């Protein structure tokens, strides 16, 4: 299956392929839970990372919180944000038992999910090459996976922690990304909206595929969702989406299924290595998914496309971030 089809539920790296790409930007904002299988179990002989900037493997039972890891310059383990002042952003009403405020960590293995398995048979997503551009069109609804039931019902155990009253609504996104992106003179900050929060999003309760709708009813992910991570075999590297600057977002799994950590990557959360790109193996820059914050994109290595809002201009997500209802074309 091609990466484009696999990501049909992006929306900001948010919910479908095209959306997935959007999700990259949105992901940086709130941040969500990644797949549990990428972390290790506690061991007295292993020195796990205790913050998003410290070395060591990531323990899925004690992932460092990204709260406060916001910067105005590129920094490893941080989100370089264009916005530094935030108004009311909603979110969970109280921390769940998966959050350990004393150690400033959270558990991906015990975090609950929003109940429900809602199908979206009319969801659409397409990606095509037009000259020097990669054109991605999608409606931000999940294409190849179900969503949870939103608004969260009062009978749902998740309601105790998060009373998200938003819906999933059809959007219109049309992105024209560079087919062969080039590095910018210097990295640029990520827009507000999707990344407009001071915590990493794990406080919120997401559905089984790591997504939820925002106040604009735009479904999105905060990281590479578990339903996509599970599709990447151990010991392989897969393209799973595109950032707004056109660079690819990849999942890189070791032979035992672990993901890289922040200290393996640069300040924009990327690296340069040989990967499959535009149908052939080549050495290029790309973003890499991690289990810890900021998950996919910390700043833009290239020049991002203009970000419009909701259902329209430039096909980006609210507040200038990418959409997030499906997979990337992140």
Image (spheres, helix red, strand yellow):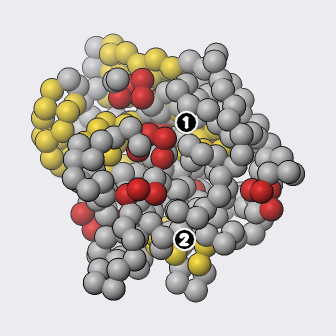
Which percent across, then down, holds residue 20?
47, 36
Q: Which residue is mark 2?
A: 106
Crowding near the residue tagged with mark 2, few <14, some 14–19, many ≥20 C-alpha atoms within 10 Å: many
Crowding near the residue tagged with mark 1, few <14, some 14–19, many ≥20 C-alpha atoms within 10 Å: many
SS of the residue under disc 2: strand
Q: Quadrant of the N terminus?
A: top left
Give whichever of 90, 315 is nearer the camera: 90
Residue 294, compared with residue 327, is above or below; it is below
Residue 303, compared with residue 329, is above or below; it is below
Picture quadrant where residue 242 is located = top left
Which percent across, then down, holds residue 2?
34, 24
Nearer mark to the viewer, of 2 and 1: 2
Res. 15 mark = 1
Q: Quadrant of the C terminus?
A: top left
Q: Residue at x 56, y 18 (%)?
A: 124
Residue 133, compared with residue 254, is above or below; it is above
Horizontal side of residue 295 vs 220, given as left or right: left
Q: Residue at x 48, y 70 (%)?
A: 61
Which percent across, then down, holds residue 12?
53, 40
Residue 312, compared with residue 36, is above or below; it is above
Picture quadrant where residue 319 is located = top right
| CA separation in Å, label 2 and label 1 | 23 Å
SS of the residue under disc 1: strand
Q: Residue at x 61, y 32 (%)?
A: 146
């Amino acid at each position: 299956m091609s990466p484009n089809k696999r990501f049909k539920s992006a929306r900001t790296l948010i919910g479908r392929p095209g959306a997935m790409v959007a999700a990259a930007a949105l992901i940086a904002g709130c941040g969500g839970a990644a797949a549990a299988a990428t972390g290790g179990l506690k061991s007295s002989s292993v020195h796990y990372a205790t913050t998003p900037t410290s070395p060591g493997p990531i323990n899925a039972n004690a992932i460092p919180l990204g709260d406060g890891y916001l910067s105005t310059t590129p920094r490893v383990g941080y989100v370089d944000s264009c916005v530094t002042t935030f108004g009311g952003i909603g979110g969970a009403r109280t921390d769940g038992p998966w959050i350990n405020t004393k150690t400033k960590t959270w558990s991906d293995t015990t975090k609950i999910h929003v109940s429900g398995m809602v199908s979206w048979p009319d969801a659409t997503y397409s990606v095509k090459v037009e000259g020097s551009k990669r054109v991605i069109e999608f409606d931000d609804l999940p294409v190849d996976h179900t969503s949870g039931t939103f608004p969260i019902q009062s009978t749902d155990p998740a309601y105790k922690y998060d009373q998200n009253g938003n819906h999933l609504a059809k959007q219109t996104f049309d992105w024209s990304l560079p087919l062969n992106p080039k590095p910018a003179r210097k990295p640029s900050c990520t827009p507000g909206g999707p990344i407009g929060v001071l915590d990493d999003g794990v406080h919120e309760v997401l559905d089984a595929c790591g997504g939820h709708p925002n106040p604009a009813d735009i479904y999105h992910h905060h990281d590479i969702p578990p339903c996509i991570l599970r599709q990447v075999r151990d010991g392989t590297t897969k393209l799973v989406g595109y950032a707004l600057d056109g660079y690819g977002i990849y999942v890189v799994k070791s032979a035992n299924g672990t993901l890289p950590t922040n200290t393996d990557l640069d300040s924009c959360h990327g690296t340069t290595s040989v990967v499959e790109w535009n149908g052939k193996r080549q050495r290029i820059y790309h973003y890499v998914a991690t289990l810890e914050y900021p998950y996919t994109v910390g700043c833009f290595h290239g020049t991002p496309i203009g970000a419009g809002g909701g259902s329209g201009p430039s096909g980006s997500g609210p507040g200038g971030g990418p959409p997030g209802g499906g997979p990337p074309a992140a």
